[in-house]
Every structure is written in structure tokens, then in C-alpha cells.
């Protein structure tokens, strides 16, 4: 299929940059755990949770609307109208964000308030420029600038934490500097500001973008209740150190995001271009979803026993309480990645009300279970509640997509995915080094076997290419 070839090509491009970017970020974990106490890292994680709350609500995910409307138009003047109307909304949102979070920080007496404010703003600025670069087809530039950003971030973290002995304020400064470096590179190439014309600002386009993005604002609030709220409750009901352990465990969940993010970015671009309701479109989305689920589980099967083996070398002894939190957090991350994947399909048809309903259901399940389980199982409650919330939302989204197009999930694959998941979990919690070494290879075999129907045509094509030379 032509779409699959395009998806494979884009995924390959993003893979080259995303792996390096995410890997550098993950390799900073030994630095954080060696130079920051669990309470300090936990406090930093809670503070950026507040920044994420205000930024996600105020900025409306406007960059998503910009890319969506740009992909729907081939006219350059129309695309420019979308870009600059979206930037006008972004600038207005910036003023509202700074005003609201400043008042909140004063009321809550947040330590390093400028760092928290800067984190939220620069994160949104990075999203804006990243989506613009991808919408203009500057994928290679996007990847290169991301690598520069991450390298700058890592170098500054090492300098400030190791050489200058800063506390967690180093993380704010390093993040902002890295994002700024990326945005400068992107602006120098796509030249957004020099190309501005007053006539590009269009009231109707602004209204269209707001109609598309305003529901995402409420959706973002619900999404925050799925992720950020858990950290605040851990700090409140247990302590800041417990949130530090939870934050470290979440870093390992980020490895799954590493596997999936390059595919997700390529998928988002393709999904926004493919919004027919015919049978072939339904078959394509069904095939892609089934394949994606198998890839995610295959990654989980291999990564969890590897994490068991590598944990002592990646995390300081002071954070050993994070070890048992890793498996359920990774499963919750897996379900969350699928949650975003399905959301991109729904957004393609501009059914943001469906996205909101499913996200609201997930957040309600998460909050209820969190408060019920925290007294009994401590920080692990956040992982269990998050996993349950995502699973409820994923089921709803699959059902809702099936109501829009001819979309069918291969439920039979769970007959072997779930039992092997249980084996890997038991190996991590109760097994020894030898058991997890065996599970690494067993996970590879299980992953290849599960994906073989998709891998076989690819390998056959490679062999044919070699014979044709």
C-alpha cells in the first residue's frame, strides 16, 4: 500500500533522530538520581506538573489545529493564513498563561517560580515550532534541531549539577536553553516572522481554529487529571520522596515512548491526510492499529527484563524504591500510547467531542481508583489507576471509531499477548538474573512471531531487491 510505504519512510526519518534524542534524555537518569535527592526530584516533578496544567489549558493545543488545517489545504496563501492566525492565538494564550500561573505561584509559594513558568512556556513554544516544521515538510530539520536541543540540555545539566553543584533549578535552565536552541534553528530555516503579512490574519480562520481547538482545551484538562493529578496526590497523601520514586519509574515508561514516538509522529501526519470513510480506509486503520499494538507489546516483552538487569547501573541506590513501580507504569504507558494513537484517528474526522468523552471517562476512573487505592498500596496506586483509566478510554475509542468507519480490532491477539505479559511481570517481580536473561530472548522470539505476518512481506521485498541487482 502506498500509505504504508509513506508511513515506513517517515517513521525511518523520525527514528534516526528520535532514538538519539530520547536516548540522551534517558541516559541523564543516573545523573539526576546521583545528584538530586528523591525529595528534590519529586518536588521538581510536581512543579512541572503545575506548569503542564496551565500550559495545556491556556494554549489549547493550537499547534495541532494549525497542522491539521494546513494539511487540508494545498494553497500557500491559505496555509499562511492558518499559520499566522494560529500564532495570533498562541501569543494571546501566552499572555493569559503568564498571568494565571504567576498568580498561582504566588498563592502556592512555589520555589523557583520563574523556572516553572518558563518550563510551561518553552514546552509550548517547542510544540508550536515542531508542528510548523513538520507541516512544512521539514522533517529532517526537525530531527536535527531536536538532537541539538537535547545535546544542549544534557551538556548544561552536567555543567550545572556536577560542576556548579546546583539543585533541581538546573533542570529548568537546561530545558529552556535546549528548547530555545531548537526554536532558533527552526526559525532560521522556516522564517516565520520575516514572512508575516497583516493580510494573513483572518477572522474566519481564527474562529475555525478556535472551534477545533477549544474542545482540546477541556480535553487537555481531563488528560492532566490522568497524569499530573496523580503526582500531586502522591505528594499530598504520602510525601515528596515517594513522588520522586514515581517520577523515576515513569522514566522507564519513557523507553516505550522512545519505541513508539517516531511511528506516532509519522502516523499523525498520515492520519491527518487520510479522512475518507470508505472500506479501504477502515481496513488501513484496522491493520495499522493491530500492528501497532503488537509492536508495543513486543517492545514491552523485551524491555522489562532488560530494565531488571540494568536498573542497578542506571539508578542510584537511594531510588531503589522505584524498582517495583516500573512494570505497571510501563503497562500504563503502553495503554497511554495507544490512547494517543486512537485519538489521532478520531481527530482526523474532527470528532473532538468523542476525544473529550473518552478522556473524561479515563480521568474519572483514574481519580476514583487513585483515592481508593493510595492508602492500601501507596505510590503503586497511581500506576494501577492510570492503567485502568487508559484501558477504559481505549475501549471506548475503539468502539467509537468502529461507529465512524469499517474498523475492526483483532481481539484474538490478546489470547497470547496477555498470558506472556503475566509471565514477564512475574519474572520481573519474583525472578532472578538468570530468569530475566531467558525472558529477554523469549520476548524477542515472541515479538518476532507476533509481527511475522507484517515482517515477512518486508523481508521478501528486500530479497527481491537484492536479486534484481
Image: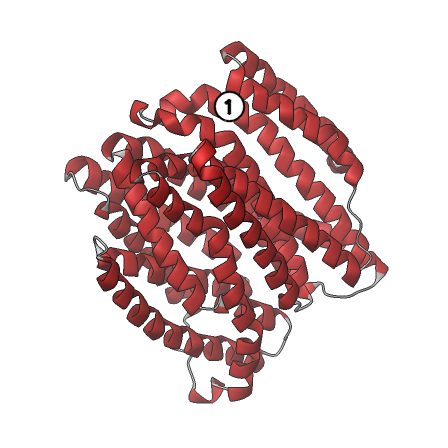
Q: Is residue 82 above or below residue 354?
A: below
Q: Give the residue drawn at x 62%, y 61%.
A: 357
Q: Quadrant for the C terminus, please.
A: top right
> Does residue 191 show up?
yes
- Give coordinates of residue 324: x percent, y percent: 46, 26
Q: Give the residue drawn at x 21%, y 54%.
A: 112
Left or right for 243, reference 263: left
- Give coordinates of residue 171: x percent, y percent: 27, 46
Q: Is residue 128 above or below residue 14?
A: below
Q: How is the image coloured?
A: secondary structure
> Does residue 24 show up?
no
Tag 1 residue: 306
Q: Give the residue drawn at x 50%, y 42%.
A: 372
Report the front residue among 462 and 433. 433
Displayed quadrant of residue 195? bottom left
- Give coordinates of residue 122: x percent, y percent: 34, 60
Q: Give the residue drawn at x 48%, y 22%.
A: 308
Displayed quadrant of residue 460? top right
Report the front residue among 348 and 417. 417
- Give coordinates of residue 143: x percent, y percent: 47, 51
**Which residue in the rendered view is the most extreme toward the left?**
164
Left or right for 461, reference 362: right
**Which residue in the rendered view is the most extreme toward the right?**
279
Amino acid at each position: 500500500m502506498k500509505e504504508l510505504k509513506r508511513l515506513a519512510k517517515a517513521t525511518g526519518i523520525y527514528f534516526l533522530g528520535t532514538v538519539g534524542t530520547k536516548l540522551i534524555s534517558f541516559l541523564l537518569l543516573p545523573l539526576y538520581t546521583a545528584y538530586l535527592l528523591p525529595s528534590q526530584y519529586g518536588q521538581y516533578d510536581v512543579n512541572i506538573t503545575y506548569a503542564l496544567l496551565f500550559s495545556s489549558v491556556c494554549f489549547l493545543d493550537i499547534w495541532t489545529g494549525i497542522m491539521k488545517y494546513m494539511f487540508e489545504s494545498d494553497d500557500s496563501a491559505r496555509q499562511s493564513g492558518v499559520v499566522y492566525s494560529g500564532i495570533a492565538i498562541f501569543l494571546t494564550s501566552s499572555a493569559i498563561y503568564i498571568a494565571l500561573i504567576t498568580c498561582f505561584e504566588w498563592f502556592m509559594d512555589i520555589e523557583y517560580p520563574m523556572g516553572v513558568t518558563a518550563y510551561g512556556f518553552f514546552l509550548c513554544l517547542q510544540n508550536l515550532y515542531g508542528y510548523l516544521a513538520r507541516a512544512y515538510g521539514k522533517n529532517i530539520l526537525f530531527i536535527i534541531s531536536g538532537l541539538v536541543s537535547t545535546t544542549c540540555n544534557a551538556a548544561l545539566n552536567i555543567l550545572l549539577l556536577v560542576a556548579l553543584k546546583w539543585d533541581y533549578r538546573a533542570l529548568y535552565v537546561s530545558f529552556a536553553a535546549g528548547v530555545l536552541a531548537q526554536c532558533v534553528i527552526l526559525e532560521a530555516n522556516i522564517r516565520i516572522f520575516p514572512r508575516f503579512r497583516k493580510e494573513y490574519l483572518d477572522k474566519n480562520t481564527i474562529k475555525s481554529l478556535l472551534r477545533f481547538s477549544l474542545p482540546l482545551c477541556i480535553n487537555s484538562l481531563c488528560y492532566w487529571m490522568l497524569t499530573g493529578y496523580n503526582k500531586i496526590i502522591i505528594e499530598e497523601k504520602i510525601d515528596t520522596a515517594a513522588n520522586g520514586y514515581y517520577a523515576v519509574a515513569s522514566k522507564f515508561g519513557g523507553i516505550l515512548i522512545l519505541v513508539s514516538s517516531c511511528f506516532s509522529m509519522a502516523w499523525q501526519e498520515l492520519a491527518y491526510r487520510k479522512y475518507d470513510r470508505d472500506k479501504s480506509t477502515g481496513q488501513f486503520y484496522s491493520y495499522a492499529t493491530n500492528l501497532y499494538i503488537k509492536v508495543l507489546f513486543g517492545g514491552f516483552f523485551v524491555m522489562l527484563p532488560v530494565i531488571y538487569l540494568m536498573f542497578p547501573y542506571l539508578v542510584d541506590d537511594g531510588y531503589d524504591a522505584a524498582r517495583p513501580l516500573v512494570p505497571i507504569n510501563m503497562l500504563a504507558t503502553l495503554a497511554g500510547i495507544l490512547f494517543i494513537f486512537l485519538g489521532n484517528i478520531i481527530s482526523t474526522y474532527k470528532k473532538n467531542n468523542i476525544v473529550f468523552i473518552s478522556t473524561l471517562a479515563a480521568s474519572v476512573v483514574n481519580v476514583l481508583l487513585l483515592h481508593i487505592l493510595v492508602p492500601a498500596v501507596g505510590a503503586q496506586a497511581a500506576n494501577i489507576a492510570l492503567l485502568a483509566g487508559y484501558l477504559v478510554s481505549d475501549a471506548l475509542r475503539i468502539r467509537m471509531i468502529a461507529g465512524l468507519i469499517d474498523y475492526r480490532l483483532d481481539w484474538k491477539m490478546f489470547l497470547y499477548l496477555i498470558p506472556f505479559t503475566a509471565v514477564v511481570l512475574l519474572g520481573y517481580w519474583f525472578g532472578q538474573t538468570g530468569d530475566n536473561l531467558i525472558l529477554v530472548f523469549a520476548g524477542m522470539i515472541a515479538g518476532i512471531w507476533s509481527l511475522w505476518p507484517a515482517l515477512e512481506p518486508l523481508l521478501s521485498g528486500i530479497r527481491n531487491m537484492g536479486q534484481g541487482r
